[in-house]
Amino acid sequence: MMRTVATTPFQDQKPGTSGLRKKVPVFQQKNYVENFVQSIFDSLEGFQGKTLVLGGDGRFYNRDVVQIVIRMAAANGFGKVMVGQGGILSTPAASNVIRKYQAFGGIILSASHNPGGPHEDFGIKYNAENGGPAPEKITDRIFELTKKIAQYRIADLDPVDIDKVGAVKAGDMTVEVIDPVSDYAVLMESLFDFDAIRAMFKGGFRMRFDAMHAVTGPYAKEIFEHRLGAPKGTARNFVPLPDFGGHHPDPNLVHAKHLYDEMMGPDAPDFGAASDGDGDRNLIIGRGIFITPSDSVAMLAANARLAPGYRKGLKGIARSMPTSGAADRVAEKLGIGIYETPTGWKFFGNLLDAGMATICGEESAGTGSDHVREKDGLWAVLLWLNILAVRGESVMDIAHKHWATYGRNYYSRHDYEEVETDRANALVADLRGKLAALPGTSVRGMKVAAADDFAYHDPVDGSVSRNQGIRVLFEGGSRVVFRLSGTGTSGATLRVYIERYEPDKTRHGVDTQVALADLIEAADEIAGIRSHTGRNTPSVIT
Ligand code: G1P
Ligand code: ZN
């Protein structure tokens, strides 16, 4: 019943910022999934008889891969697979299940905010026993194994019925199909003041939550409408679809423009939010005001004590390097640690495990805390709701008061998508060559104070991660950062992050792109973006 199958390696199975991401037809090649999953298992030790958590965002190919992983887990000696009903588990919910049931680890099937469908993206990611994405030393090991794999183990089993909650046998292994929502909802109830939020809804507070036909739909229905009493219809597009209804399940101002427009319109509700394909990202919009993710993490941290789960205060805040420095000012005022890590949630894991940071955030709409080891879209929405319920003020008022206290970090990210890989690499190589000569020079009247290629020294395990983004710092605290995306599936994506600090309260009402105009030009002057990429404008501005 257990078979060992001979196979040959693929050379393109290098996990990126968050797991292996490729187009569905790539994953559909014979042995492609099997090779990668076997390489994950081969990179691990000591899982015999232990539990593996399994689930995904429901995108096309999710169900097929769930069955493959179950058969391979059985053949490799796992004792149990806990799988979300229908193969569904949001990324933060999977992280919670791993932690709560002390599983050995988990496999999450998702390509996050990338589109889904037969010709779109799919992804496989391994999370370790702390519930977080495997650290680089494991993903590197997995990649090495994929390059020389010669065989994999699989059990000949009928497909397991993953639509019925309960335990069944798959060979010697148990498959327990679990409700994907309930453990997560219980966790949220333990962190937030559900009574206060319920009372706010009862008082007429209006909210829109757009699940973008992705994984958070069932979670949002249950938590907002059933447990918190929000009116029916608060959760929109709440049925997860394998192709996300043909849209990008990416909660940004481009792909959730309808929500933005509604929130800026005459009959805007009090609060608008959205989450991405696998439920780890968030979009927060108040009536008449978009909150940038960088600001959101700062504002959440500043107000976290209003939520029961954070009443004792924060141990520290961590943010990815390209994320704005708004959170740094909050940490300074609170007298707690602030940590600057490379892009990618996996870098927060050690800080969270060591109890050095409580809240973490990335400019790319990821916010979370030590309640799990992934960023968590609904968590961010609920913390905002908790804060709004306790303060009884609008999002707009809270934001303006925050800026008045801490100053405002104007911030924007410009993405150049699907640039030819060679051209993008040439831009980066050129830029690296120029770095040493930049300090002391002036660009558009702004003096460069420092320039480097960010290297992270992990304070917990001492590991060093180099080449994590090129930073050019100007006198006065403005900066531009350049890096290539590690999650794209076609060509290269150049990300340019632009930031300017404005302490003066009378100048907090300027349009962001206007406030950053000089720096945007400076970025082009420094890196030759237009000439290298052949593009005049970014594909996405957030
Ligand atoms: C992007 C984001 C990064 C995030 C990752 C996974 O990675 O920039 O912050 O952690 O997606 O959601 P990138 O494509 O920039 O490598
Ligand atoms: Zn995601």
Image: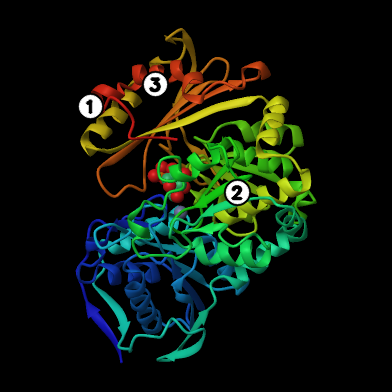
Mark 1–mark 2 contact, CB under 8 Å? Answer: no
User: Is the residue at mark 2 in contact range of ligand 1, meaning its CB lies under 8 Å from it?
Assistant: no
Would residue 103 be found to the left or right of residue 55 on screen? right
Is residue 226 something that shows in the picture? yes
Residue at point 48% right, 55% down?
135
Q: Quadrant of residue 5?
A: bottom left
User: Which quarter of the rendered picture does the C terminus lie within?
Assistant: top left
Judge the density around disc 1: few (<14), some (14-19), many (≥20) Cα neighbours within 10 Å: few
Q: Is residue 65 above or below residue 395?
A: below
Could you say where residue 535 lies in the image, as x and y percent from the top left? Answer: 26, 27
Q: On the image, numbered disc 3 is attached to which residue?
A: 523
Kindly state the secondary structure of the residue where label 1 is placed: loop
Q: Earlier in the sequence, mark 1 or mark 3?
A: 3
| Outermost residue, front side | 266
Residue at point 58% right, 56% down?
378
User: Label 3 sits on what residue type?
Assistant: Ala
Q: Nearer the viewer, residue 296 or 252?
A: 252
Q: On the image, numbered disc 2 is attached to which residue?
A: 460
Residue at point 46% right, 47% down?
251
Could you say where residue 398 lies in the image, as x and y percent from the top left? Answer: 70, 36
User: Is the residue at mark 1 in contact range of ligand 1, meaning its CB lies under 8 Å from it?
Assistant: no
Q: Earlier in the sequence, mark 1 or mark 2?
A: 2
Q: On the image, numbered disc 1 is attached to which residue?
A: 534
Q: CA distance from mark 1 to mark 2?
A: 42 Å
Could you say where residue 300 lies in the image, as x and y percent from the top left? Answer: 67, 43
Q: Is residue 531 above or below residue 185?
A: above
Name the image colouring. Answer: rainbow
Judge the density around disc 2: few (<14), some (14-19), many (≥20) Cα neighbours within 10 Å: few
| Outermost residue, right side | 312
Is residue 128 something that shows in the picture? no
